[in-house]
Amino acid sequence: QVQLVESGGGLVQPGGSLRLSCAASGFSLKRYTIAWFRQAPGKEREGVSCITQSDGYTVYADSVKGRFTISRDNDKNSVYLQMNNLKPEDTAVYYCAAPDPMYYCSEYGPDARDFDSWGQGTQVTVSS
């Protein structure tokens, strides 16, 4: 059974940092492109970042470019999202997701409709 589990969320002040982790079980994550999404109350789910399985190609939403970094550690079967210089508008539930194994990150960012397996989410709150 494919399972993704996010961790690392929490409460942080503006300008602070958090590192989210996405751990996979039941499958080898290195075979899959992985993306991070977020959803704030009353808003649609937004694609934040994507990293391909083949060449490590990465894509970021304009709102997080230069502040967030996605990476993967295939030996640990995990993907990470390093978030720096956090802003109140980054407050959301963050999800990692896996698509069909043949999926490649779009330059326009990940589309939630292309992703089949989702974690339960981790809350990130940026507030003073």
Image (spheres, rainbow, N blue to C red):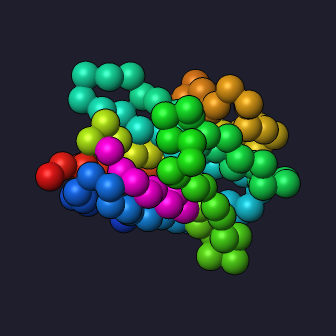
Left or right of residue 104: residue 4: left
**Observer-nearest residue: 32 or 110?**
110
Residue pictured at 71% horizontal, 47% vertical: 58
Q: How many marks?
A: 0
Residue reaching furthest to the bottom: 75
Residue at 64% from the left image edge and 44% from the top image edge: 50
Q: Which region shows up in magenta?
A: 80-87
- Say left or right for 119 vs 74: left
Is residue 3 placed above or below 76 in the rendered structure? above
> Is residue 20 highlighted in magenta?
no
Q: Which quadrant is home to the N terminus?
A: bottom right
> Horizontal and vertical percent for residue 114?
64, 29
Residue at 38 percent across and 62 percent down: it is: 18
Dividing the picture into quarters, in which one does residue 113 lie? top right
User: Is 46 placed left or right of 71 in the picture?
Assistant: left
Picture residue at 67% right of the left edge, 41% below the top: 59
Residue 33 coordinates in the image, percent (x, y): 71, 48
Vertical placement of residue 80 versus 57, above or below: below
Q: Position of residue 28 (x, y in %)?
A: 70, 64
Q: Is residue 86 magenta?
A: yes
Residue 121 visible in the shown view? no
Residue sitting nearer the eye, 38 or 86: 86
Taking depth in this image into account, of 50 and 113 the one nearest to the observer is 50
Q: Is residue 10 visible to the viewer in this orientation of the structure? A: yes
Q: Residue 6's spot in the image, x, y percent?
A: 42, 58
In this rendering, is residue 23 above or below 95? below
Of residues 94 and 113, the one nearer the viewer is 94
